[in-house]
Image (cartoon, coloured by chain):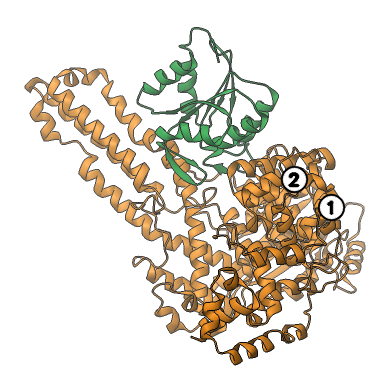
Chain colours: A orange, B green
Amino acid sequence: MLDAMMFVFIHRYNVTVLEAAGVANIVDRYIDEYLSQRWMHFSTSCCPSTYLAGSDAPEFDDETFYRQSIAFIEYRTISQFRNGIDPYYVDNKSQPIIRNIESAAFATKYFRRATSLSAIAVEPRAYKTRLDEYDNTCAGPFLRTVAFIHLLRSGARSTEISAPQMLSLLNNTMRISELAHIEELRNFFGSPQRDSLVNYLAQAVISDCSMQNIDQHKLRRALQEIVIERFNGDLIAFADVLWASSKNVARHLWELCNEAFLVQLFFLFKEPEMVFEARAQMLDWYARRFGDPSVSEWAKTLRLDQKLRKIRGEIDDNRIYVDPLRFGQWLLANQVGGIAKVEQIEAKDIDEFRAFGDFAFNRQPHIQMAISLQTAFSEFCGDKRYGIDSYLGRRIRHGTLKGVMLVQLQSLLARPRYQSLLSEPSVSEFVHEWFRQYESNIEFWGKEIFQVASKLKPRGAINADITNPEKIVVTRIALHDLVNYYKEGRHISQINQATFEHCWRLVEKDLLAIRLFIDSQRLSWGTMDRVELQYLASDDLQTQAREFCRELNTLTDEKFRALSRWFTRPANLAPSATIQLLLDATLDEMKGHFPDFEPQIERSGLADLELIGMYYHHVYDFMYVVIYNAAKHGKRNGRLVEEIAVLPGVVPGTLEIGIASEICEQDTIEQVRESIDAAMSGDIEDAMVVEGRSGLKKLLRMSTDIREIKSIDVSYIGRFVRFKCVLALDFLR
Amino acid sequence: MSGLPTTILIVEDDTFKYDRIIACLKNLPERPAVKVARSVQAAVALMNEMRFDFILLDMSLPSHDLKPGGGAGSSLLSGGLEVIMELSFLERSDCVIVITQYPEVEIEGELVSIASAHATLRKLFSANIEAVILYRHESNDWERELLNTLE
């Protein structure tokens, strides 16, 4: 009732909507005069919003004010401001707000000083939220955005301003692609853009708004054009230029340049490894320019994983596959912030988890954790570039399913030895009908069954819902595990590794069902009935009929088994590496720096020990520093001894990695000892950030900072320098 | 396009299917000059070098050619669209024949049946799309359709 009264009073007295609608007198008849006078008194008094303190980020004060202004809506100034501004600030996917006469008048008056794009493209000098009129010298991004939409709808065109002005305009506005309609933006940027920067900006806004493939292609083209023509193909140089003048536009470029986008910049990156390097460079750039070193770690992970993958060789493409590198990058990009209030999650909450609920229900910390897992699992299953769906599309739907299942079988029909049998009409009809059914079933599998279930593919055998009854037990185990990881403060790479593992366990339920399904179907329609065929064949062809059936059924048995194996998780796809692989990767990299580095490698101990997640990054860092120094200062064709040992009787498992290298002929071991002691002494605070050093100080820093590294020390034996790294490995417990 | 094609680009990463297409082209009265691209990147590069009378296009393609030790390209299930969009962008009239093994083509996130794919592609993109053909290992129908379109 109170809300209804507020609505009536606001629309009668604050804004004259009811008057314009010709119903004011009806309202007046039912409202006590004293009440209306009091309303007028209070609604025109000074709005308490005037006294709100500014925030630490004053550029966002106008948006914060706008969002909170509903709390002061009974004040006339606020009502009139919202009545005039709201129609501009409606999401383009929502129904527009129909503007009343007073709203239009307010907008004209409010924006009387914002009559052209150039008037709102000048950078602000300070920030102040004004409700009486738009003031470009102090308008924040929210009001500038509204002013832009106002001008856009008044017929402004991009050609009215220069490229730097456009950059400034976009840098100081927000959500334009969500507010403006695509037709409005196409008209705004309608004229051919001669300036490649304006063209890039135009395509970026249009593409963000339309989300259509053709606009995304134009954006990729525009970006490549400016980077190639004006920055000699250097994407980072372009990012730097944007950053220098327009940080928000630069950040938009960074957000745009994920791997999926970069991989389609075919003129800039002609080899796939160039894409990974470009991504890593963009991550480093962001870390440097926006002061977020954790993003640099992400780049490091990407480079190392890419290196390891190259050394590992090609994947087993016959088994279902999710690219751990790309999925790992997605996890880093989407789950870096972690989950809030994990410490509040209790085991019983997870044990009782069955399904998601409404907004309030989903805000509970354990549900947030489940939502995070659900998001990751949806990506794991549904991503079309590296997820399960990518594999299904490539290997099964588009590729080899029919070829593998059918072609060899059909060759039986052409065998000379079966020609007499197949020339008998009744046999021929029976066999060809069997083949038709068989082919139709295989087609059905590809089209309907070997799919990620969705509205369009309801029979899809891969179910990406973690609350599915078949999966809920595995889901709860995963949630317990992940909560423990968060509570223990585990490194993000360990959490992501665990998430990857649990996604495989979740999908294993479906894979098992598919394998059982394939086996059952083989018995149903994947074998030919020998008795039936022999019944149809004439007496003198009974042997041929039996042989044909036996050969066909042996083949289908083989094919169905092979198909079943496709739905088995590959054993070697976790983001992990053996110590031997890490050493190979390090040596490979050193040869890039020192082409004549040809050490005689001697390995002893457990070189094939598999390290997972962050452990292999630590070991790689250790090896890199040690072998880099061996290559730079030591005997390049000398002996390099790698010794790996798991120390007995120590809990938790302790791994010792020793690398000994031979020193140069002209050096004495004393000289080398002095050099190393000097390199490792002094302040280690800047050891991880200062470039151009031997890196030996980094070893000291690693042993101080990294919980899993127990010690790193150096010893001298004969003409050898030996570095030893001792790690505590949880997984050896 | 009038007369027989003299230059054809085949964009196809499946060797088996590529061999079948090449064998099929031998049935043309005059042999065209054929270029092959096994990835979207290679196709886009070739298209920017020269014009073709016909482009025979698979839809599911890798982003880049696979090179030993060169890392893996990305699998683009609708990679063929990139080729079509490049033609649109270049305002080129090279005739495109989509030859796909799957009865549905993903366009703008929707699965479009092969019967509707031709009209949908022509509506969305300004490239000169002549036909969308369903390829089948075991059938010769697609060969007849391809030859008819080429002739």
Residue A165 — which label? 1
Of marks 1 and 2, the one in the foreground:
1
Q: Position of residue A71 (x, y in %)?
A: 63, 82
Q: Is residue B22 above or below residue B118?
A: above
User: In this rendering, would B32 be left or right of A156?
Assistant: left
Left-right relation of A528 to A592: left
Lateral position of residue A398 relative to residue A717, left or right: left
Q: Amino acid at mark 1?
A: Gln
Residue A203: image quadrant is top right
Q: Chain of mark 1?
A: A
**Residue A383 position within the rendered picture, expressed as x and y whole percent measured from the top left:** 52, 52
Q: Residue at x 16, y 28 (%)?
A: A430
A322 to A402, vertically: above or below: below
At a point 51% along the width and 37% down the height, the residue shown is B60
What residue did someone put label 2 on?
A200
Which residue does the image show at 66% across and 33% down from the upper left? B89
Q: Is residue A450 above or below residue A106?
A: above
